[in-house]
Amino acid sequence: MRKVTLLLTVLFVTALYNSTPVLAQSSGSFSASFGATQCAISNNDGTLTGGIAGTSLPDVTVKVSSGNGVALVITPSLVTGLYTQNKLNQLTPTATQNVGLRVKVLVDNSTAHVVPEIGSNGVVYDQRFIQVNASFLSGLSTCLLDCFTMVQSTLAAHSFNFYVSNLAPGSHTIRVTWDIVGGGTGEGTCVGPGTLTVEQVKNFTFNSGINLFF
């Protein structure tokens, strides 16, 4: 019995050290960048302070593998701030403000194949339209300066999934930028902190694939 046990042990150890190693292949890769500067709302007057300097997050470079069905899922997550201040008086009984932040994802400096942009200028993360009408002020002879003021400030976190497929194998640069929608009449915006995550995924043949609906 001891001889049989010893023989089995020797065979097991021999097979363990002489077997061909099996390496697990990763199904994707993950890359990220971030901007750490934070927006804040002033306790005194509601104005926005801080935020990321400039209008973009650090670029991310991703090396795409070969093969059909390879795609990148791109997720910019940002804290956005909006500030509006509507002032009314006898001469200006109506005030309208409209401001927002629009985020754009570029792959190799183009939005042509990035869904849902497909060549557009990006996706609105946050926008505010406010109109105040106080017609009674026109009848007040003593109200010539700022008789009515409405200040609004908000901070909120937003994220959105963009994706691009059918990229050529090799390195590709992902850039996230933002710009102001509207504005020009005293509104304010702020962005930060923010993160950019890029994940390489593989669409297998038994999945439904990527469908576009317009």
Image (spheres, rainbow, N blue to C red):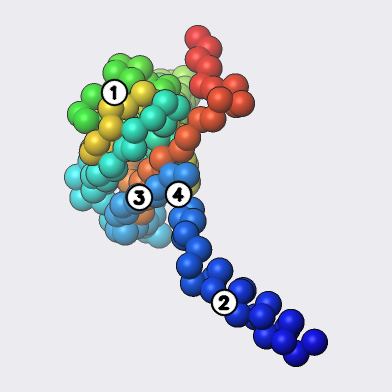
Q: CA distance from mark 3 to mark 1?
A: 19 Å
Q: Which mark is residue 111?
A: 1
Q: CA distance from mark 1 to mark 4?
A: 28 Å
Confirm or deny contact between disc 3 and disc 4 (CB under 8 A).
no
* Point 56% across, 69% down: residue: 15
Residue 112, placed above or below residue 17: above
**Type of residue at label 3?**
Ser
- The residue wearing badge 4 is 26
Q: Position of residue 54 (x, y in %)?
A: 19, 45
* Point 54% across, 30% down: residue: 204
* Point 32% across, 45% down: residue: 190
**Type of residue at label 2?**
Val
The disc, 2 or 4, on the residue closer to the chain's N-terminal end is 2
The disc, 3 or 4, on the residue closer to the chain's N-terminal end is 4
Q: CA distance from mark 3 to mark 2?
A: 40 Å
Confirm or deny contact between disc 1 and disc 4 (CB under 8 A).
no
SS state under label 4: loop
- At label 2, counting other C-alpha atoms closer than 10 Å, the crowd grade (few under 14, some 14-19, many 20 or more) is few
Q: Position of residue 18 (x, y in %)?
A: 48, 67
Q: Nearer the viewer, mark 1 or mark 4?
A: 4
| Frontmost residue, 117 versus 198 | 198
Q: CA distance from mark 3 to mark 4?
A: 14 Å
- The residue wearing badge 3 is 31
Q: Position of residue 208 (x, y in %)?
A: 60, 22
- At label 4, counting other C-alpha atoms closer than 10 Å, the crowd grade (few under 14, some 14-19, many 20 or more) is few
